[in-house]
Image: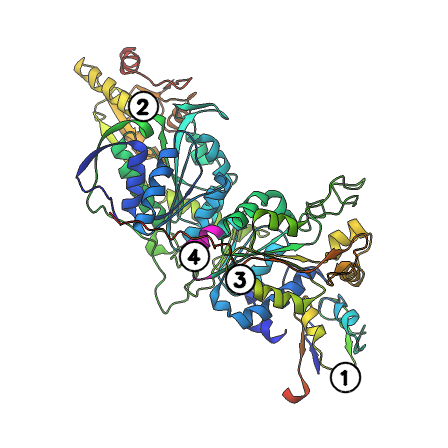
Amino acid sequence: MVDIDKNQCKGCELCIINCKFEALVRGTERNSKGYIVPAYIADKCTSCKMCEFICPDLAITVIKENEL
Amino acid sequence: MGASINTKAVVIQGNEASAEGALLAGCTFFAGYPITPATEIAEVMAERMPKVGGIFIQMEDELASINSLIGAAWGGHKALTATSGPGYSLMQEGIGYAAVTETPCVIINVMRGGPSTGQPTMTSQQDVYQAKYGSHGDYEPIVLVPSSAQEALDLTIRAFNLSEKYLVPVTVLTDEVVGHTRERVVIPESPEIYNRVPPPEGEEYLPFRGEEKLGGVPYRANFGEGHNICVDGQLHDEIGMRVGHMVAPSAQLVKRIMAKINDNIDDISDYELYHTDDAEVVVLAYGSTARVALRSVLDARKDGIKAGLIKLKTLFPFPDAMIRNETRSATRVIVPECNAGKICNEVQRVVSVQVESMPKFGGAMHVPSEIFEAIKRS
Amino acid sequence: MNPLGKKYLRKEALPTIFCPGCGHGTVLNSTLRMLDKVGLENFLFVSGIGCSSWLPVFIKADVLHTLHGRAVAVATGLKLVQPDKKVMVFNGDGDNMAIGGNHFIHAARRNIDITVVMLNNYIYGMTGGQASPGTPLNSKTKTSPYGSHEKPFDAVKLAIGAGATFVARETSASPIKITRTLEKAVNHRGFSFVEIMSQCPTQAGRNIYGKSAPSDIFRILRDSAVSKKDTELLQGQFRTGIFHLDEETPVYSQKIEVAAS
């Protein structure tokens, strides 16, 4: 599961282009700073953590299934 | 720690005496670059630092030297560098950084003729303004001016003490004459040493908050002690976070770092007075010129002239009140100096009578008779 | 915020000054993973001036944010008096190779046991996009509007030539490689240099590439990096990996036999 800290996000979309599984797409919600936050598609996610690692704002936390 | 010379008095040159003073003060880090006429200080420290468990490193230039001092100081050590005019110019950005981050360190500038490459082997007192104003921005350094090899030792110890007490870069401004003259120096056995004050345990530590108890100076913890200190050259608040984009806290920091020096001038100021009580002609001098001036003043007194001498040992912060007081009976104030006339302007700012400047060019020094003649002139 | 960020970032310093999509942010993220493994309490940080130099300020540790180009000299002094700590420098292509070039090559020559991480975004970002010693030839920048006339440094070759004993290059497109390489670099005894090519969508993007979307500049960077040794390089590409590892050359040391007198 991918948790996106909405108000840390700057809408750079690096997570979107780095997700091999298309589990992150451009969203429709804007955060308090006006950035468009990505939308998460749980079904496609494999918890590979690439989004967590690439995010320049450390806004993403990947929680593996067995940690929930 | 301490002098390796076990006798009480020795005959050494001022440069060696400066190094001895640094060792007595507890200096354990020296970084420098060779430059005439200061190189002997580095050479003595190269030999003595390892013997006291300290570090000596010859850096690639003076920029690297002053900057490595900053690292060593935050690492908890008393750090020293030594240079002359051209190197001192290069160190100014580092000195400004030390001033705004309140980094204790000592810089010895053995003045030589300038400007630029100038006169590498000749004396001068030309860098006096640079010692106070050399870096950009508003700040308040401390500048000491020894006039003999003995004072080179004593004032270098004092420089370290003031640097630790006020968390400020201190310049010891000697000159080629003081640096290279060999004379009798008494090595003190256990001089009084001052160390930066660590924060009290159990309380929240704000690394850049001026403490009333310490005269506006912060407590000082070092790196590696778990305080997670952020040191920044940009104007910062009490926890080190940048405030350069905000007027009030920026002003607050600059005012505090200047006030911690200016408000404590009585503690920092150091001078000697000779016959100023009833003096009608007062000579104000510093550094090697002060020795010449003393001879002239004593000769004038023998001749029945009411002459007096103010010899400054702390040049900056400039002792306005003391000078005003000691020239109260004077109708003339004479300022001989080995430059185009610089401190005479400071004196003029302070006293109401006309100040007579006695500049000196070309690397020469005043001789007693010329100051004596100037005193006699009415 | 991810758990390492919550644990290791200095709250009072946030938000970071990094633009959306700045590679330096990914480097910060990757660095925290290394620090978590090696132990943050062992580190002291020094940086210069520029976007890259802000990185350690965001970490809750002892940080010396110093003058432009002087971080390596400050780090030298700090390391010599606290030899048991890992001293890590973060700086940029301008800070390390222009104004700081002299201090860089001498620290490498001395083989001082510090780690210098140079974030190369090909430009002076903080000041608005001027040419730096990392800017590719013929690039348009604010101070090379007709295209730069200068070849950039190859920082890896410069470091090896100066005597660095651990030299590596990665990019901000490879966060896992960054963490692994930084761990090797900080554990190496001697002068370690890691160049991390980092995308700057705002300044390098707009000036050099004529684009500003982070994903576009990211893709250009990712596609320039070649990790396989036997692959031929195309125009504009560079190699990544560990280029030099020397564990024979003695680390700078002041241990000498001197009788105390």
Q: Is the residue C41 above or below the residue C136 in the image?
A: below
- Numbered disc in front, either 2 or 1: 1
Query: Residue flagged by tag 1: what amino acid is it?
Result: Ala
| Nearer to us in this view, C10 or B206 | C10
- Residue underneath mark 4: B209
Count residues near mark 3 (Cα–Cα under 10 Å), then give few for <14, some for 14-19, many for 20+: some
For the point 31% across and 23% down, the residue is B289
Residue B345 in sight:
yes
**Chain holding disc 1:** A
Q: Secondary structure at mark 2?
A: helix
Q: CA distance from mark 3 to mark 2?
A: 55 Å
Is disc 1 placed on a helix, strand or loop? helix
CB-based contact (under 8 Å), mark 2 and mark 1: no
Name the residue carrying label 2. Answer: B289
State left or right for residue C115 relative to residue B279: right
Disc 1 designates what residue?
A: A42
Instruction: Give the spatial CA distance, label 2 vs label 4.
Output: 40 Å
Q: Which residues are magenta?
A: C76-85
Give yes or no for contact between labels 3 and 1 (Cβ–Cβ under 8 Å).
Answer: no
Q: Indicate which label's residue lies in the foreground, 3 or 2.
A: 3
Q: Quadrant of the C terminus of chain B?
A: top left
| Protein chain holding label 2 | B
Q: Name the kind of residue labelled 3 in the image.
A: His
Residue C95 appears anywhere in the view: no
Q: Are marks 3 and 2 on the same chain?
A: no
Residue C155 is left or right of residue B220, and the answer is right
For label 2, count other residues whose C-alpha is less than 10 Å away and answer few (under 14), some (14-19) or many (20+).
many
Circle 3 residue:
C188
Q: Pinpoint residue B259: horizontal percent, then vertical percent.
A: 41, 46
